[in-house]
Each structure stands twice: as C-alpha cells, then as structure tokens.
Amino acid sequence: MPDAVVIGAGPNGLVAANLLADAGWSVEVLEEQPEPGGAVRSDRGVHPDFVSDVCSSFYPLAAASPVLAGLELYREGLRWSHAPRVVAHPLTDGRCAVLERRADATAAGLDSFAPGDGAAWQDLYDVWDRLRPDILDLLFTPFPPVLPSLRLAARLGAGDGLRLARTLLLPVRRLGEEEFEAEAGRLLLAGNALHADLAPEAAGSGGYGWLLSMLGQSDGFPVPVGGAGMLTEALVRRLEHRRGALRCGERAVEVVVRAGRAVAVRTAAGESVPARRAVLADVSVPALYGELVDERHLPSRLLRDLHRFQWDFATCKVDWALDGAVPWTAGEASTAGTVHLADGVDGLTRFAAQLAMGQVPDRPFMLFGQMTTADATRSPAGTESAWAYTHVPHRIKGDAGDDGLTGRWDRREQEAVADRMEQEVERYAPGFRTRIMARRILAPPTLEALDANLSGGAVNGGTTAFHQQLLFRPMPGTGRPETPVEGLYLASAGAHPGGGVHGAPGANAARAALRVLTPARLLVRTRRALARRDRGGRPADPGARER
C-alpha cells in the first residue's frame, strides 16, 4: 500500500510526488492520459521534422520558482534555452517595443520612443530587483504567507509598502499611463498582463503585468531544450529514481472516503488504490468537488460556493511548421521568443470587451511563439516551429467577425478561427502564410481532451481576477491545499497561487500532507524522545519536526 496516491501527472502532481518521495514516502501517481505531463508536453504531430509544444511553451515562472530549483532537475538532464530577445510587441508602422535580456537594453529601446521612458522602466526594475526574493516567497508560500509578508514590510516600511500595494492593485492601463509617455512601455506591461484573463482596466492587471514583465527581465522566458516534454521527462525520471510509481492510462473516478478521511482512489477500471497517509489531487476544482468526492462528504457551503467558481478564458491554439523565418515588418521581432500582437492598449481593451460580451473577437490578441528562435533543436536550420494562441468566450453569444462562429467547434469553425489568426499575423508579417508547411488547430474541446484540467481550453485553473485569488482561491475562506476531507489535498493550479508552470500548488499540497502528525507517527516520535531522555539527552518535542 503506498503512503500517498497522487491523481494527475501534470507538473504540479509530479512535483508533489517528488517531494513526498524525498521525505521517504512511497508514492503512486495515476494519470488519465497515455503519457504524463498534462499541459507540459511536446510531440512531432505537426510535421515529423518539427518539435511542437502541445500546450504551454515558455516558462518564466519555472525559471524563477524556488520549488523547481530545489528539485535540481539539471541532474536529470533538463537544460534551458533563451531566445536573443524575451518579448517583442511589433507595431504596424514597423516600430517595435522590446523586452531585452538586459534591463539597460530594454530601457534604451524605450527611450527611443520617448526620452525618460527608459529611466521609468529602470525604476520599475530596480524595485523588482530589490524585492524579488521576498515577492517570490510571497508567491510560492502557502497562504497566508506570514513570514514573507513581515520581511517585505520590514524592508519597505509603511510608506513604500503602501505605494507598492497601490501599484499592484492598479489596472495596467493606468499603470502604463502613470509610468510611460509613449506606447512601447505601456504595451510591454499590458501585453504581459493579458497572459492572464485580466482586461487592461481590471484591478490588479497592473500588478500582474509588472510581475510577468519583471520576471522576463530578470529570468527571461526560457524553454526546455528539446521541447516542453523534457521538463516532464526530468520530473518523471527524478520520481522513478526515488522509487515512485507512475501509471498512465488510469482515470480516477472517485476518492474513497471513510469516517471523514480519504483512504483510496478508485479507477475507471474498478481498481481501488489504497492510500495509507494521503491523496493529493492535481485536478481542477470542479472535478475534485463536483465529481471525485461524493457531495455527502462536503460542507453544504462549499457546494454552494462551487457554483460561483469561475474559469479563466477559453483558448484556441494553432501550431505551425514554417519553411522560413516569420517575415516581420519590425525586424526586432524576429529574434524574440514571444511576440504579442495587438493594436496598442486600445486594441487589448477592445479584445477584452468583446470577450466579456460573449463574442469571438474579430481582431484577436495573440501570443505568438517562435520556438526555433528560442531553441535551435526544435526544427531544421532556416525553418521555424511556431505557434499562437488567442482567447474566446466559454459560452459564445455571437461572432464579432464575419464567420458566424457559434462554439460548435466543428471543422469549419476551427479552420475559420485559424484563418482569422493567420490574417492577423499577416498584418505584422506580410507573407507569413506563404511560409506555412503544415498547421495543427487545437480548439477548446481538443485542449480539454488532451488534459481534463483545461476545461474548455482554460489554461490557468480558474480566473486570475482578485475575487478568486489569495484566500478566495479556489473559494472564499480556503487559500490552502487542505480540503474538508482529512488526508485529501488540492494540488492543482486551482489552488493558491494559481496557474503557470512553477510547481507551487503541488509543493504546497505535499508539504501540508507531510506536516500532519498521525497517531502512529506521534507514538514513534514520542518513543524516540523518551529514549533520548533516558540516554541523558534533553527532552524533545515529538511534534517539532512535523511543524
């Protein structure tokens, strides 16, 4: 009987399993798909000579994560690669806002748009550079992050602390207007804010845009050499070296609860996999509380709150095999790993407003990835393995374009969205479509079929808006991996701190499980303490290690 059963072999589930194995626990991981990784996978499904990342691609949060750093995945062969430039936001007139690898280079580029904007960027970065360790601790520590908060407060003082809090709460449109005279700096912040489901006018979008921009400045947007799947392979190898077991093709259908405690996981094949100490669920919040755990084991208030759970935007993604580099009008975009495509901050606002009204945007904002630019192993020399994604409503009420999209996501609708995205790229890179050798379309239902946690193509495990963050994530009064069922822990992006490949939800769940002092463990530690006392040692607190 394993000490712990982990449901789901996405990055959070694999991180949790590794940490439990490090502590000496026997661990069994059950994965529904035929291969591990969740949204961190790669394949050659677009073209046999091209490596394409199936879902996620760039990993600034992974690069900064103390959780992943602590796993020392380089020992398992993981290597990172960077594009010459981090992010580019081309304009239709040929100019380009660029997040360079060095802050002074980014500042110099912004000064070319408006003198003084470079100094404003440097000021924002100096704040980040000074506070980075404390902010990362805040992000990756289980809620409430008491010690990191105290350290940050002591470092800042009351006045500067309030100023930083105000900055983080600002809408990104307002933050950009306060800091920069020209459009370039504003676009870097706003484009990064739109990696989440936050409109430019949403409270907190400024903080998110600043955070991701500064992570890009200090850590880059690196990619695993050889494909996103290399990160998953490193996590799996590490787990196997610690004798953890991974079983793919095993769909969990029930968390078995007895006397208020999770004791096993039942699979679709009818097998009951017992768990001596804990069950950790790297699954979505609605899947855990709406499907895996029978509602009779859950408080009625939680079930009512579950109806208010909000997903982040749905996603459409297109992968391309290109026979040459993307012909950007703005040359700087050709050396950036990530390219944002939108007609200024107003274009981002228009896009977000159409989504809010339930319309498929007619001019989609896109995140465009140039993977061979970031990692030369992804395709033959002189070619480009590329992708882009955009967002669509979960429930489509209308189409702001001319294709009559309804959300059926049949072949016609998928092709229409892909064509619309390619036409948008053409505005910034005339001739782009002539470079396409092959393409693959991943509509919202396809993404969900690849990973059940990506419900409707939602990639962040739930909205990033303030009403579902911190102590409200995933529901009011939670904010921690513990659940109402003893021995059951939420280990997915649905838990604090949320989406992104950084491993924190899995790590928080594993640490919560390890902190629990069961009667048997208490007896063992008490006996050891008494033995030390009998040998003349100082009396020991048998629970000290567990806390």
Image (cartoon, rainbow, N blue to C red):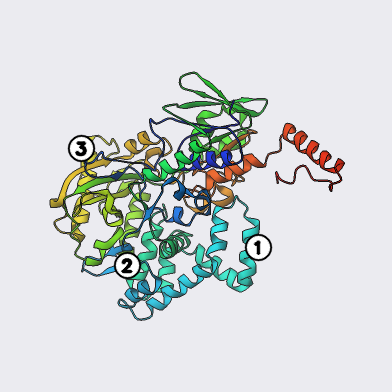
The structure residue drawn at horizontal position 61% and vertical position 73%, both measured from the top left corner, is 159
- Most extreme residue toward the front is 535
Q: Earlier in the sequence, mark 3 or mark 2?
A: 2
Element class at badge 3 = helix
Instruction: Where is residue 277? Give x, y as percent.
Output: 63, 32
| Residue type highlighted by circle 1 | Leu
| Residue type highlighted by circle 3 | Arg
The structure residue drawn at horizontal position 61% and vertical position 41%, both measured from the top left corner, is 23
- The residue under label 1 is 150
- Alpha-carbon span between mark 2 and mark 1: 35 Å
Element class at badge 1 = helix
The structure residue drawn at horizontal position 54% and vertical position 33%, both measured from the top left corner, is 289
Which quarter of the figure has residue 328?
A: bottom left
| Residue neighbourhood size for the residue with mark 1, other residues' Cα within 10 Å, grouped as few (<14), some (14–19), many (≥20) | few
The structure residue drawn at horizontal position 38% and vertical position 30%, both measured from the top left corner, is 34
Instruction: Please name whichever residue, 72 or 58, is drawn nearer the observer in this view of the structure.
Output: 72
- Alpha-carbon span between mark 1 and mark 3: 55 Å
Q: Earlier in the sequence, mark 2 or mark 1?
A: 2
| Residue neighbourhood size for the residue with mark 2, other residues' Cα within 10 Å, grouped as few (<14), some (14–19), many (≥20) | many
- The residue under label 2 is 98
Above or below for 363 versus 119: above
Instruction: Where is residue 74? Give x, y as percent.
Output: 45, 50
| Residue neighbourhood size for the residue with mark 3, other residues' Cα within 10 Å, grouped as few (<14), some (14–19), many (≥20) | few
Q: Quadrant of the N terminus?
A: top right
- Most extreme residue toward the bottom is 115
| Residue type highlighted by circle 2 | Val
Instruction: Where is residue 96? Give x, y as percent.
Output: 27, 68
Which quarter of the figure has residue 190?
A: bottom left
- The residue under label 3 is 412
